Amino acid sequence: MTRKGRRLALIAVALGVAAAAVGLALYALNDNIVFFYSPSEILQKNVQAGARLRIGGLVEAGSVFKSTGDKLDFSITDGANQIKVSYEGLPPDLFREGQGVVAEGVLEAPGRLRAETILAKHDERYMPREVVEALKKQGRWQEGSAKP
Amino acid sequence: MIVEIGHFALILALALALAQASAPLIGARRGDRALMGVGSSAALGQFALILVSFAVLARAHLTSDFSVLNVAENSHSAVPTIYKFSGVWGNHEGSMLLWVLILAAFGALVAAFGRALPATLRANALAVQGLIGAAFLAFILLTSNPFERLSPAPFEGRDLNPVLQDPGLAIHPPLLYLGYVGFSIVFSFAAAALIEGRIDAAWARFVRPFALIAWSFLTLGVAMGSYWAYYTLGWGGFWFWDPVENASLMPWLAGTAFVHSAAVMEKRDALKVWTIFLAILTFSFSLLGTFLVRSGVLTSVHAFASDPRRGVFILLILAFFIADSLSLFAWRAPLLKQGGLFAPISREGALVLNNLLLTTACATVVFGTLYPLALEQLTGEKITVGAPFFNMTAGVLLLALCFVTPFGFSLAWKRGDLLGVAQRLSVALAGGFAAFVALIAYLRGGPVLAPIAAGLAIFVILGSLSEIAARVWRGSLSPSTALSRARGLPLSFWGGALAHMGAGIALLGLAATGFGAETIAAMRVGVPQTVGPYQIVIDSVSERAGPNYRETVAPMTIRSGGGVVTAIEPARRQFPTRQMATTQAGIATLHFGQIYVSIGDPDADGTIPARLYWKPLVTLIWLGACVMALGGALSLADRRLRFGAPARAKSGAAAAAVAAR
């Protein structure tokens, strides 16, 4: 093979690998992206049932209801609106009423989420950043009330 | 008073780092030996001063000196001594101090043992290393001073985050930093080569030992972080494609590519410009990782309480080094003498393919990690790119890499014989394919990815073994001749074979996650629960007190087919100081697999919610990583690569080349 031919072969292989990577990335991006909303945003944006998303806010006080061991129902609130969440499994260690939480799952109906993953904060000084911003939007966040 | 000594030592270290960044650079330009010598002394002095500073902070933590803000906020007098010590880097300020300590240690390594290096190359490399040190020392002193005092001193500290009260904290960050930061020296050598405008095969020989040290530690650090997350979080997962994990994977992928391309440069004097580029890229990813983890742009366990000034400062450092090194690259790289092109079917051709796959896999990880951040900044939309995306992109590309690995490893340099190699690998190919078919038949219509991965893993492992066999044993050799042939093979060959085998072993562990079992159950004392081939029973539930926590333990017995196999003790710990609870998973290792049980708080009706997992072969993931790191260490021990011995190295290389025939 000539020098030019070798160089062309190299470029062709490089382009091939790059094209494959871009193709895979576009294909994977199609249905693997999850949007984050606050409860108010879900109601405002009229998100369709069946969408996969993350919701962040506070666990509403008095809303946590545990039934038969591993089923858990609660509401996520940003102070203005609430979304009901049902979850099967163990909540994380720091899941508590009145604390920040992020739930990921499928919206079954407007205002009701079937969660597959629940993330709580991991330190009493720390609040998930998305939750802080969701609360700020509703004017429910006072700087200094807790360190973000 | 002693605390202030630590602070002053850090300021002096900054002054020395600035001297190290300037004097040798000027010296190298003017050919002034005295000025160039400043680099070595400054590097050694800087390391000593940062060591003093680190020791002072460690002393403050060990003696629970709560007049130091850092200790008061992150320690407690009741914390066990080991966690008092590892708590030194269990917070933002201390972890940055560990970062610069390791940075300075690598500079000192070059200063102390690099006497055989060309003087100007060493001077320039030390100057660049000094500049990185100066930037990060300034960062610590201006935004994250670990020696800040607190007056009046509180009587008790606020405790170390319970999640961090784990032996993992003593091991994972130092290993990871040795890897992460170790690539700084590779970067410095690359910048030095660009400054000089000259690069040759000897450069690769000087740099490869550092790259191998850094790569081995990075491999161990990533694996250790994964194992720590696995046993401490209680979800049974070992890799979440979390941006922080990706931050350590990106330099690993680029660094792996570098280690391979440097081999081509060393043996064939080709791929020079590309290798330099990879050196810059790898450390840029280390810096990017530091930014992602330390600036607080991400929500993660690694984000300590943060301050926006820090993020901006690290971003400036990141932008400075990446932009400057890439400009230097664009300006000087055309001066470097181009190496020859080579035949596509050859060892070096295969290594180019390896590099292409590794860097595109790395690019997809970078994209998946940064795209959500960029989108949020631009549109305010918050999205998450999860595991499915990364599995589909980086995962598939890395599987493709595993397929070509044994071919590349068996091909000869210069001109390879693909047909001959395929024949040589026929046993490995057949073994891998048989494993794939057997698993498909066994699963009947399950996910196809796990059998593919398992088949490839077997192929990679057998491929390494058959290459060893082909080199050692040919025709009708007596065992003693074969043994002496094995001894004659260069250590770097054994290292490569071992590292590839480690990759295969880790892949086998990853593939086996597709064959596990998991259940979530409300368990009662005495009532067995089945998971996979095992039955698990809670024997009793009790409370007990630890040094700084209380725990609920539920000892369990594991049975299989009537006989008792083993016992575990999952627990939940309550830490009163921080009002936090942690899960202590009960883990039993059985034939490389693990039974993993984590429990929740007992319910009012006496049931205990529990997650139970049976994870066959799961330990292979981390054992494989250890084998890979061992392979790196073995290559390092090769006489040819012994640091700072270029004269001997030449004859060693010749001997190795002869032995490899």
Image: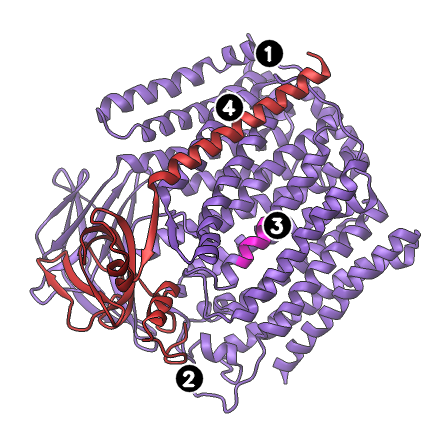
Chain colours: A red, B purple
- Labels 2, 4: one chain: yes
Is disc 2 placed on a helix, strand or loop? loop
- Closer to the chain start, of discs 3 and 2, is 2
Is disc 1 placed on a helix, strand or loop? loop
Answer whether labels 1 and 3 touch (C-beta < 8 Å).
no
Whole-number angstrom distance, CA of label 4 to CA of label 3: 27 Å
Q: Amino acid at mark 1?
A: Asp
Query: In which image quadrant can residue B526 be found?
Result: bottom left
Residue denoted by label 4: B404
- Closer to the chain start, of discs 1 and 3, is 3
Whole-number angstrom distance, CA of label 2 to CA of label 4: 58 Å
Disc number for residue B156:
2
- Closer to the chain start, of discs 2 and 4, is 2
Relative depth, front residue between A128 and B640: A128
Residue pictured at 33% horizontal, 40% vertical: A31
Residue denoted by label 1: B417
Residue pictured at 26% horizontal, 34% vertical: B515
Disc number for residue B284:
3
Answer whether labels 4 and 3 touch (C-beta < 8 Å).
no
Name the front one of labels 1 and 3.
Answer: 3
Residue B506 locus on image (x, y percent): 42, 36
Look at the image and tell me whether residue B347 can be seen. Answer: no
| Marked residue chain, label 3 | B
- Closer to the chain start, of discs 4 and 3, is 3
Disc number for residue B612:
none
Q: Amino acid at mark 3?
A: Ser
Q: Quadrant of the C terminus of chain B?
A: top right
Residue pictured at 42% horizontal, 58% vertical: B380
Residue B167 locus on image (x, y percent): 42, 60
Relative depth, front residue between A19 and B622: A19
